[in-house]
Structure formats: C-alpha cells, structure tokens
Image (cartoon, rainbow, N blue to C red):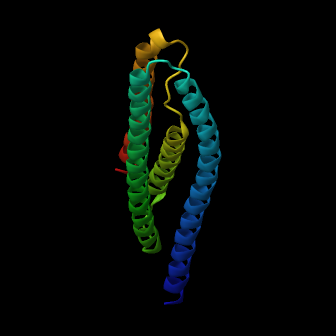
Amino acid sequence: QERRETVKQNIQDRRAELKQKFEDRKAELEARREELKTRFAAKREAFKEKLQALRDKRKQKITERVDERLANVNQRRTDHFNKVLEKLNDILERIQAKADELEAAGQDTSALAAAITAASNAISTAQTAVSDQAAKDSAATITIETALKGAVGAAFKQLQTDLGTARDAVKAAKEAVR
C-alpha cells in the first residue's frame, strides 16, 4: 500500500513536471512571438509606405487586399497548427500517465519512455517551426510598379512553401506521437 502511494506521488510529480516544462516552453514561444510581431508591424508600416508610392490606385488597392489575405491565411493556418500541437501534447501527457502506471505495476517501460521523449522533442520542434511561421511577414517587396505582379506572386509562393514546411513539422510530430 505504501509503495503504491509513493508510485502515485511519483506519477503526479512527473506529470506536473511535464506540464510545467510545456508551459515554460509555451511562455517562451509567446514572448518570442510578441517580439517578432512588433518587428512584423514595423515591416508592415514600411510596406504600406511603399504601397502609397504607387501611382495606380487600382493596383494599390489590389496589392493591399492581397497582402491582407496572405496575412490572414498565415494567421489561420498557424492557429490551426497550434491547436493540433496542443492536442498532441495532451495525448502525449495521457500516454505518459499510462506509462507511469505500467512502470508502477513493475513492467519495463524503457522503450516507451524513449518514444515519449522523441515525441516530445518532435512536438517542440514543430512548435518552434509554427511560431517562426506565425511571425513571418508575407508582404511583397515593392520595388517598381511594373514588377508588382511578380513580387506579389513570389510572396504568395513563399507563403505556400513556408506553410508547407510548418505543416511537415506538425505531421512529423503527429507521427512521433502515434
């Protein structure tokens, strides 16, 4: 009975430690995200100033609308990725709890512990990739008015590539948890 209580306490301590580690990592990423958002805002202002320099008002409005759409897509996708990563972390916590129970029952859980560590690292890596993507600026580089179509197209293509990289990181985390 006493051994069972100590094992239960160890399980609770481990669970609290994992939760604290995740919360610390999340706070660190939020701070980094806020810093990058301020940098992003400065870049956005520079983009708007260059946009005002365009003579053709129709092109100006279209470029601004496309830029807002790119930012909106980036925000939605990174929010979705963050939700997926939170769910994966919850699943991993439940797996860790089950592993602790099995260990308390006297079973060998070393392979499971290694898999849990690998999955935790994959989630961390994916979280970093997603937070980096969330902070990226997808604004087109405006140089001359005649090259505007190419610049907007390049910005769209770059956003697609970046979101694909973040998606692949989330997929890898999902597979590691599986």
What number of labels is visible?
A: 0
Looking at the picture, how far across and down is residue 72, in whole percent? Answer: 40, 41
Task: Identify the residue at horizontal 59%, vertical 55% (top origin).
Answer: 25
Residue toward you, 97 or 76? 76
Q: Is residue 123 left or right of residue 13?
A: left
Which quadrant of the view contains residue 152?
Answer: top left
Task: Identify the residue at horizontal 37%, vertical 47% (top origin).
Answer: 174
Residue at the limit of the structure toward the top, as seen here: 146
Task: Identify the residue at horizontal 56%, vertical 71% (top origin).
Answer: 16
Which quadrant of the view contains residue 13?
Answer: bottom right
Relative to 48, does residue 82 appear above or below in the rendering?
A: below
Looking at the picture, how far across and down is residue 118, in whole percent? Answer: 49, 47
Residue at the limit of the structure toward the bottom, as seen here: 1
Q: Is residue 13 at least partly visible in the picture?
A: yes
Q: Is residue 156 at least partly visible in the picture?
A: no
Residue toward you, 157 or 161? 157
Relative to 59, does residue 123 appear above or below in the rendering?
A: below
Task: Identify the residue at horizontal 65%, vertical 46% (top origin).
Answer: 35
Looking at the picture, how far across and down is residue 125, in whole percent? Answer: 52, 43
Q: Is residue 149 left or right of residue 33?
A: left
Residue toward you, 153 or 127? 153
Looking at the picture, how far across and down is residue 145, in whole percent? Answer: 48, 13
Relative to 34, does residue 44 appear above or below in the rendering?
A: above
Relative to 140, does residue 174 appear above or below in the rendering?
A: below
